[in-house]
Image: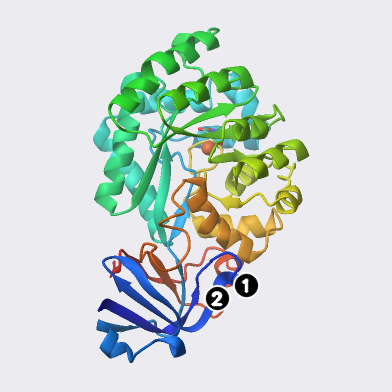
Amino acid sequence: MLDVVWLGGNIASMEAGAGPWGAIRDAALGVRDGRVAWIGPRAALPAPPGSMAREVRDFAGQWITPGLIDCHTHLVYGGDRAHEFEMRLQGASYEEIARAGGGIVSTVKATRASDEGSLLASAMRRLAALTAEGVVAVEIKSGYGLDVETELKQLRVARRLGDEAGVTVRTTFLGAHALPAEFAGRADDYIDFVCTDSMPAAVEAELPDAVDAFCESIAFSPAQTERVFRRAAELGLAVKLHADQLSDLGGAALAARHGALSADHLEYTGEAGAKAMAAAGTVAVLLPGAFYTLRETKLPPIDLFRRHGVPIAIATDSNPGSSPATSILMMLNMACTLFRMTPEEALAGATRNAAMALGMQATHGTLAEGKAADFCLWDIADPAELSYRIGFNPLSTVVRAGNPT
Ligand code: NIG
Ligand code: FE
C-alpha cells in the first residue's frame, strides 16, 4: 500500500536516457516512506489509484521536477562586499582587490568577528531565497574562517541551517581558500596548518562531508593543492576544486587525478582537463553568477565537456564577492544565455548532475523508484520556462520526503 499517489500532471524526471527531460506526460507518482515507490504514465498504473494508496492527490496540470540542488555555495559569512562591487565598477579587478587585502580576506575578518547566531540569521535569509525557488539540497563551504575556531563555526552553522530549514546540507571544508594575514608570505606554512590543524579538527568534530581548495595564482599552487588533497584522502574525505577560474594552472586535470567529485568554475580549462575529468567521472560545476559578476569574457569550454561526456552542473556560488546570488533560476537562465547551454542541460545541471557533484546521486537528482520523494510542482506549460523567464518564480509547491511543505 502506498502512502500517497499523485496524479494529473507531467513529470520531468530528468532520468538520463529517458528522452527529452525524462518526461512522463499525464503521470502518476506513488510515495511510500518518503521515497518514490511508483512512477510512470497514469495509464500504466496496475490498479485504480484509490485502491493503491491511502490518499490520492492532484498535480493540477502542473510540471513536476526533482527538487533542485545548489551544489556550490559559500552561504555562511559575515559582512558584505558592496564596496568592492563599486570599486570594480570603477575599473579595479577582482585580483587587484584581492592582492590589496580586500576580497576573501576582508570577509574572513567579518566572519571571525561574527557570532554563531548572527551568521545563522544572515545565512538563513539567503537559504530562504534558495528554497523559495525549489532548492531542497545545498552544499555549503567554510573558507571564511581560515583559523580552526572560525572554520568549525562556519561548518556548525551550515549544519544548523539544514536542521532548522529542513533542507539537505552537504558541508565542505575550504581551509585552503585564501592566505590569512597571520601567515602572510608563508603559504606553505599555512598549508601545513590546514593539513595538521584545521582539517583534522573539522574531521574530529565530524563536520565536513568533503574538502575543497582554491587553486589559482591569487590563492594556492597546484603543489599546495595536492598536499591538501592527499591529507583529505588520508582522512577519508572526498575532494572538489575551485579550478581554472582566472587562469589555466591545470586544475581540472589535477582534480581528476585525485578522483574529485567535481571541478568548479573551469573557464580556462583545456581539452586535456576535460578528457581527464571524463575519465575520472569528475563533474564540471559551472558558475555563471561569478562569470557575470566579474564580467568574464572567457567562456568555460562547454563543447569540450559535451564532446567528452563530462556531466555539467550549474550552481549559484553564492558568496559576498564574486557571486552575490541567491537565485538558482537566474543561474539556469544565465547558463543558457551566457554559456549557450540548452534549457534541458541547465535543469539537469541543477538536478541530476548537481547530485553527482555532491555524491548523492543514489538518492537525489532525478525522480525514479527508490529515490527521495523530494520534488517541485511548477505552474508552467513547458519545462524550458524554468530557464526562460527572468526574475519570475513559477514554483507552487515543494514536496520533501513525500510531504508538501
Ligand atoms: O567561488 N574563487 C574563489 N572563491 C569564491 C569567491 C569567494 C569570494 O570572493 O569571497 C568563488 O568565486
Ligand atoms: Fe566558490
Coordinates of residue 249 in the picture (x, y in percent): 69, 26
Placement of 370 over or under 289, stated as above or below = below
**Badge number at residue 341:** none
Front residue (pair 75, 85): 75
Provide the residue designation for mark 1. Answer: 20
Amino acid marked by disc 1? Pro
Secondary structure of the residue carrying tag 2 is strand
Front residue (pair 273, 376): 273
Name the colouring of the figure.
rainbow
Query: Which residue does the image show at 46% across and 59% down from the upper left?
Result: 68
Tell which residue pokes out farthest to the front in this image. Answer: 46
Query: Which residue does the image show at 56% across and 60% down from the upper left?
Result: 348
Provide the residue designation for mark 2. Answer: 23
Placement of 137 over or under 377, stated as above or below = above
Q: Mark 2–mark 1 contact, CB under 8 Å?
A: yes
Front residue (pair 368, 115): 368
Coordinates of residue 67 in the picture (x, y in percent): 42, 62
Q: Quadrant of residue 93?
A: top right
Does the residue tagged 1 have its C-beta within 8 Å of any atom of ligand 2? no
Front residue (pair 22, 2): 2
Placement of 238 over or under 222, stated as above or below = below
The image quadrant in which ligand 1 is located: top right
Task: Classify mark 2: residues with Cα within 10 Å, few (<14), some (14-19) or many (20+).
Answer: many
Query: Which residue does the image show at 46% across and 21% down from the upper left?
Result: 231
Tell me the quadrant of the picture where the C terminus can be found.
Answer: bottom left
Amino acid marked by disc 2? Ala
Q: Quadrant of residue 375?
A: bottom left
- Tell me if 222 is positioned left or right of 27 in this view: right
Coordinates of residue 144 in the picture (x, y in percent): 42, 28
